Amino acid sequence: MNELSLFNSLFDDGFGFIPELYRTKTNFVPKVDVQESKETYLLTMELPGRSENDVDINVKDNVLTISSIKEEKKEDAQDKNAQKEKWLIRERHISQFTRSFTLPDDVNAEEISATFKNGLLNITLPRNVQKNEVKKITITAA
């Protein structure tokens, strides 16, 4: 019996093989909160274990897309020999997500900004401030 046999009941397919599902990329959907004020929308996304370098943000055709692919560092032969611990199960090699949001018409896409701190991505979406003034339209005779 090896160390992995303790975990087999959780992951075994019944034939002694770990299903392919556990060896592939993992997709997840990060949680998002959106706040609204008179001047901005604020989108806050939870991204634990990621940094600002792991995330891409794009705007095209009034759609905001946030995506990320994070790949765990691969070990080389020297690292394996120097490593004191060994993996029994390792499922988190690659994780990825893509989320897209259709922006409201009043968002100023040219002024969108983003910050990343403590696993939280904050995207500020400034609103076009338009005065609700009544404009008199003059009718001319044709």
Image: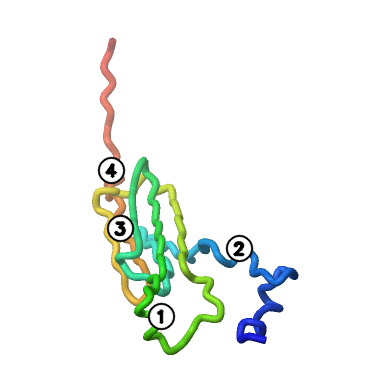
Per the image, the residue denoted by label 2 is: 21
Name the kind of residue labelled 2 in the image: Leu
Q: Is residue 66 left or right of residue 20?
A: left
| Label 3 SS | loop
Q: CA distance from mark 4 to mark 1?
A: 70 Å
Per the image, the residue denoted by label 4 is: 133
The residue sitting at 30% across, 45% down in the picture is 132
Q: Which class describes the residues within 10 Å of circle 1: few (<14), some (14-19), or many (20+)?
A: few
| Label 4 SS | loop
Q: Nearer the viewer, residue 69 or 138?
A: 69
Q: Is residue 49 left or right of residue 91?
A: left
The quadrant where residue 1 appears: bottom right
The residue sitting at 62% across, 82% down in the picture is 4
Per the image, the residue denoted by label 3 is: 39
Name the kind of residue labelled 3 in the image: Glu
Q: CA distance from mark 2 to mark 3?
A: 45 Å
Q: CA distance from mark 4 to mark 3?
A: 17 Å
Name the kind of residue labelled 4 in the image: Glu
Q: CA distance from mark 2 to mark 1?
A: 25 Å
Which numbered tag is attached to residue 127?
none
Q: CA distance from mark 2 to mark 4?
A: 59 Å
Per the image, the residue denoted by label 1 is: 80
Q: Is residue 14 left or right of residue 36?
A: right
